[in-house]
Image: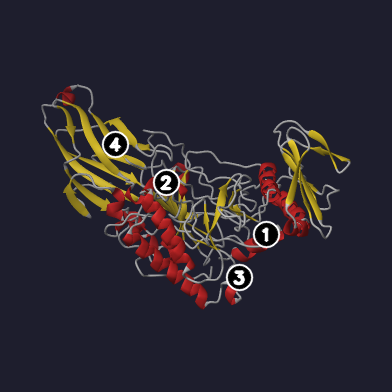
Amino acid sequence: MQMWEGLIQKAKDGGLDVIDTYVFWNVHEPSPGNVLFSLKLSFGFPVWLKFVQGISFRTDNKPFKHAMQNFTQKIVLMMKDEKLFKSQGGPIILSQIENEYEPEREEFGSAGEAYIKWAAEMAVELNTEVPWVMCKEEDAPDPVINTCNGFYCHSFSPNKPSKPKMWTEAWTGWFSDFGGQNYQRPVEDLAFAVARFIQKGGSFVNYYMYHGGTNFGRTAGGPFITTSYDYDAPIDEYGLIREPKYGHLKKLHKAIKLCENALLTANSTVTSLGNYEEAHVFSSESGQCAAFLSNYHTESAARVTFNNKQYNLPPWSISILPDCKNIIFNTANVTGQRSHVQMLPTNVTFHSWETFNEDVFSLEDDSTITTVGLLEQLNVTRDTSDYLWYSTSVNISSSDSFLHGGERPTLSVQSRGHALHVFVNGQLTGSASGTRTYKRFTFRGNVNLHAGVNTISLLSIAVGLPNNGPHFESYKTGVLGPVVLHGIDEGKRDLSWHKWSYKIGLQGEAMVTGLGSQSSIPFVSWVPSSLEHKKQQPLTWYKAYFDAPEGDEPLAMDMSSMNKGQVLINGQNIGRYWTASLMLYSQVPCSQILVEAKTESIDSL
């Protein structure tokens, strides 16, 4: 919240006219009918929606449509009450219903067509008196406007000539996932795409993202989406201007606005200037004239003649001439310095380090559920935690050959995601994980068993929830098996239908609310520790205190010395981190960092 005013001012200074923001369903209706708002400002689905009887997401399904209509009506009514729509004298000039539905409509067939018709009619009947749009939905029913999302939208046309040509998501970069690369989009290409869209009659461009920000807490979805949602945006995750992207787009916006009168009063005339070159000219009866000179060759520059003058066009570029004579901007000619964000150490000292080792869950502990067979993770946790323990017992005969010099048994565990730690008799045996592309994975490793009863405990870890695709409410997470013990005298033993006990979350998660107070937490024994001499153990919590640094510069925590876990400051979950490479079967310990600031708040991390 503290950053919003500055971010909006930077957007305005960069030549933007409007701000687009989401109304997150999961944030604002955390339980059915419980609508919470602290902002006067499209969907992240709340987890409770998955468990509504008979529901199927985003199709002609009565339970889903009932929940969606209730929430949408409540949001619109609240905004009407605050007189936020343009028709009431407020700032909202455009609203969106649904999002990129075309793949789902094709999957659902007639039910998808019926749903999108219903959604459009429901939105229009709310009588906001501002236009509604549907992005990437070519069959958007009238009067809803279908729009384009993508890296390039120059070839897009609305489904009716009376509808404006709108680009609702001009992708400035891409999101990052754990184990994946950090994507960057050159500003030359982005500026070229925007200018090309405008020269072909585009009337509206919305950057996704102009500022990406941070997925604080456990809000990152995907799964496997990182805490950072920087998106290579013109304003970076920390609210700092990214050059040359910010400055180059600012010049583009200024050049386009200088062409405004011609663009609004004339249709373009397209003239070929060569094999890869052309001119788009907007010339009105009142004498207004603007031209866009384009070179579509990706490697070769061109020299063209336009209005009896010669112009040099770099490869893959568009030059803008607001008076049809003078070039004031070319998309490929980037000037100005490139900004480099440096993370400089502050004078902050972490002191009073303490650690707490999480106990490995076993059958003797209090469990949430005990039942025969393996349960889907989200059905048990209801997303109250990333973590779910699975625990069962295995009885080994004293005569089994591996106990007398034979090869150790192997345990295989098949999981639907997203990461897994395997413990046998309280000792870490190994770990495994999936990726955003391949969420399913199999752990396979040798295990140390003894004669008699052995305990196998599996800690399944979710890394965000699925948030798109047909029937994503039915996507499964967690250990669903089979879980098989190989290499014992009987050959193999399938443990999938053994009696399993389940426990939601980690003990340390329950103590988080106690942070920031002067009183210690009674059921947790913190041990003073020096990180310099401490070997990292799996499932370890680390806690320290620090004085918040002076000033209002953005802050970040360097987690490169850690592996995987979450960071909490003054009891607030800052987000997940996962610095180790995602390698199947790697023994990656899981840890959490909890730090307390002695001042009341930190503006941004």
Q: Residues within 10 Å of mark 4 (few under 14, many from 20)?
A: some
**Can residue 267 be seen at all in this image of the molecule?**
yes
What residue does disc 2 label?
106
Q: Amino acid at mark 2?
A: Glu
Mark 4 lies on residue:
414
Residue 189, above or below 101? above
Using a 10 Å C-alpha cutoff, classify the residue at mark 3 as few (fewer than 14 neighbours), some (14 to 19) or many (20 or more): some
Query: Residue 91, labelled with which disc?
Result: 3
Looking at the image, residue 262 sits to the left or right of residue 482; the answer is: right
Disc 3 versus disc 2: distance between alpha carbons?
35 Å
Crowding at dot 1, Cα within 10 Å, few <14 / some 14-19 / many 20+, comes out as some
Which image quadrant is residue 187 in?
Answer: top right
Marks 1 & 3, CB-CB < 8 Å contact: no
Which circle's residue, 1 or 3, is located before the other in the chain?
1
Viewer-side label of 1, 4: 1
**Label 1 vs 4, first from the N-terminus:** 1
Q: Amino acid at mark 3?
A: Pro
Residue 355, can we see it? no
- The kind of residue on which mark 4 rests is Gln
Q: Nearer the viewer, mark 4 or mark 3?
A: 3
> On the image, numbered disc 1 is attached to which residue?
16
Q: CB atoms at circles 4 and 2 under 8 Å apart?
A: no
Question: Comparing marks 3 and 2, which lies closer to the viewer?
Answer: 2
Cα separation between marks 1 and 3: 14 Å
Gap in angstroms between the C-alphas marked 1 and 4: 49 Å
* Amino acid on which disc 1 is placed: Leu
